Amino acid sequence: MRILLTELETLPKNVVSVLDSLEFKVDTYQVGNINIADYDVVFGGSIVKQIGLESFKNLKWIQLSSAGYNHLPIEEWKQKGILVTNAKDVFSDPIAEYVLFYTLMF
């Protein structure tokens, strides 16, 4: 399984080495350094929207780095049989802490 990681700023620093140790083929996205058609999994939906789904010949799964997905063509991707998952609840604790802090501050 080949994995393409984009939006690296949202991931822990050691994610590439961890995935490599599990014997996944992992690449990080840089313009022109890879053949997009080879990837089964993409982390970060914006790159799929930007490049176009037709360029990803083997794509089976898109993992979004955000909870929101209104800006992406999710229905089109699902119709093509691609699993799309988001980062639901990843931001729940930080948002709750932020709201509580500002409530106490005021």
Image: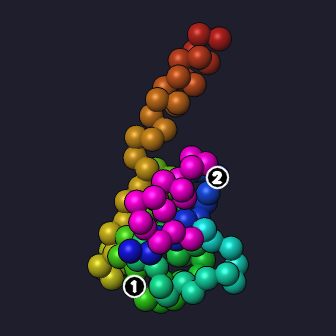
Q: Residue at x 54, y 56 (%)?
A: 17
* Rendering coords of residue 16 (x, y %): 54, 58
User: Can residue 73 be seen in this snapshot?
Assistant: no
Q: Quadrant of the N terminus?
A: bottom left
Name the image colouring: rainbow
When the figure is inspected, residue 50 is found, relative to residue 28, above or below; the finding is: below
Q: Residue at x 70, y 78 (%)?
A: 31
Magenta-highlighted residues: 12-27
Can see residue 65?
yes
Whole-percent x, y for residue 30 in the image: 68, 73
Q: Position of residue 74 (x, y in %)?
A: 40, 70
Residue closer to the observer: 16 or 68:
16
Name the residue located 61 percent from the left edge and 60 percent from the top edge.
7
Looking at the image, is 18 positioned above or below residue 23? above
Seen from the viewer's position, the closer of residues 69 and 39 is: 39
Question: Seen in the image, is 102 located left or right of residue 58?
Answer: right
The Cα atoms of the two marked residues, 2 and 1, are separated by 25 Å
| Neighbour tally class for label 2: few under 14, some 14-19, many 20 plus, Cα within 10 Å | few
Residue 13 in magenta? Answer: yes
Q: Give the class, few, some or many, for how many residues have Cα within 10 Å of label 1's Cα (few <14, many ≥20).
A: some
Is tag 2's residue or tag 1's residue first in the polypeptide sequence? 2
x, y percent for residue 59: 40, 79
- Tag on residue 84? none
Q: Which residue position is annotated with label 1?
A: 58
Q: Which residue is mark 2?
A: 9
Asked if residue 102 lies left or right of residue 43, the reply is right
Amino acid carrying mark 1 in the image: Asn
Three-letter residue code for mark 2: Glu
Q: Is residue 56 above or below residue 43?
A: below
